[in-house]
Image (cartoon, rainbow, N blue to C red):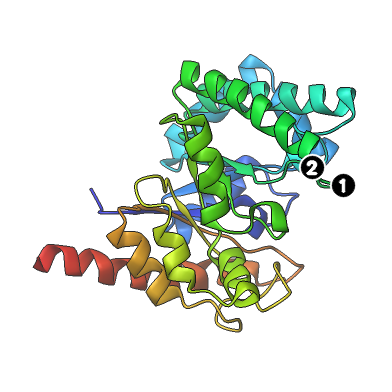
Amino acid sequence: MKDYTLGLYEKAMPGNLTWRQKLLAAKRAGYDYIEISIDETDEKLARLDMPCEERVALVDLMAELGMPIRSMCLSGHRRFPIGSSDEKICARGMEIMEKAISLAEDLGIRIIQLAGYDVYYEESTPETRKRFEDNLKIAVEMAARAGVLLGFETMETEFMNTVEKAMKYVRAVDSVYLNVYPDAGNITNAAVTYQKDVLDDLRSGAGHLVALHLKETVPGKFREIPFGTGHVDFPSMIHTAWELGVRKYVTEFWYTGNPKWEKDLYFARDMMGALLDEESGRQVKR
């Protein structure tokens, strides 16, 4: 068994591929698992209502190909936040939470990455923040019953763009089922904005970091920045995360129409795999 696992964000591949094609592409590139996306689109949200037979078929396919889906990026709460002042939107957000946990349980997904928003398309207020925290406690109870870990993604907005901010809610809820799943690129941008040390921010989550998104960014931009062209210090980020006990990582990047997209998978896997292998080697020498 390796000392770490490296996953591939589903959106790094063309959306029109079948699950068989996606799983095989990830396997060819050397990844250990895929992180499924449940975003705010109707297409992705419909996955939460996947019939039982389709769930079983997907589990069988993962076993056949030797390539599992082991984490979920649940960004559907951007459209249906659990802190919303609109009761219907808020109720839909909680329904999404419940169904996402059920899907994770059925597919063998260990970690659900939660979007760190109280609201997104409306103004954040003391009331939305209070509602978010109250509903979060209910969501954590759901996760506890299923044995599925929840981890906050550090986002691009002021509400939760650092590990330190996410930890305020982790401490308030005080459950082993709620932790932090930071985004290396987002916390790097936040550190530049606040003129703070990004590694100190990462360390503020010690004992509560379930995984790490390896994503490239530049100041003010949070998506679709090719690896190696931004300002994220991946060697230092991975080294610090490793020292903090993180052993699950996901390369987060997007398919943007490149016909040679599979080469991007190999490039990201080789780049991050080399850094992780280096940390693993250091551990053996100790």
Amino acid type of the residue tagged 1 in the rendering: Glu
Give the vertical position of 25 relative to 210 (above or below): below
Percent position of residue 119, x then y: 79, 42
4 vs 176, left or right, is: left
Give the vertical position of 62 relative to 157 (above or below): above
Helix, strand or loop under label 1: loop
Helix, strand or loop under label 2: loop
Q: Measuring 64% from the left and 59% from the top, which residue is drawn there?
A: 12
Quarter holding residue 252: bottom right
Q: Is residue 270 visible?
A: no
Amino acid type of the residue tagged 2 in the rendering: Val
Measure the C-alpha gap from mark 1 to mark 2: 7 Å
Give the vertical position of 38 relative to 60 (above or below): below
Percent position of residue 100, x then y: 64, 28
- The residue lying toward the viewer, choosing from 198 and 229, is 198
Percent position of residue 187, x then y: 57, 65
- The residue lying toward the viewer, choosing from 220 and 255, is 220
Q: Are marks 1 and 2 in contact (CB under 8 Å)?
A: yes
Q: Measuring 56% from the left and 59% from the top, which residue is drawn there?
A: 183
Percent position of residue 168, x then y: 54, 44
Q: Quadrant of the C terminus?
A: bottom left
Q: Measuring 56% from the left and 19% from the top, which residue is drawn there?
A: 142
Q: Measuring 52% from the left and 34% from the top, which residue is drawn there?
A: 172
Q: Residues within 10 Å of mark 1 (few under 14, many from 20)?
A: few
222 vs 63, left or right, is: right
255 vs 279, left or right, is: right
- Which of the numbered marks, if any, corresponds to residue 30? none
Q: Which residue is mark 1?
A: 123
Q: Is residue 2 visible?
A: yes
Q: Which residue is mark 2?
A: 119
Mark 1 or mark 2: which is in front? 1
Give the number of marks: 2
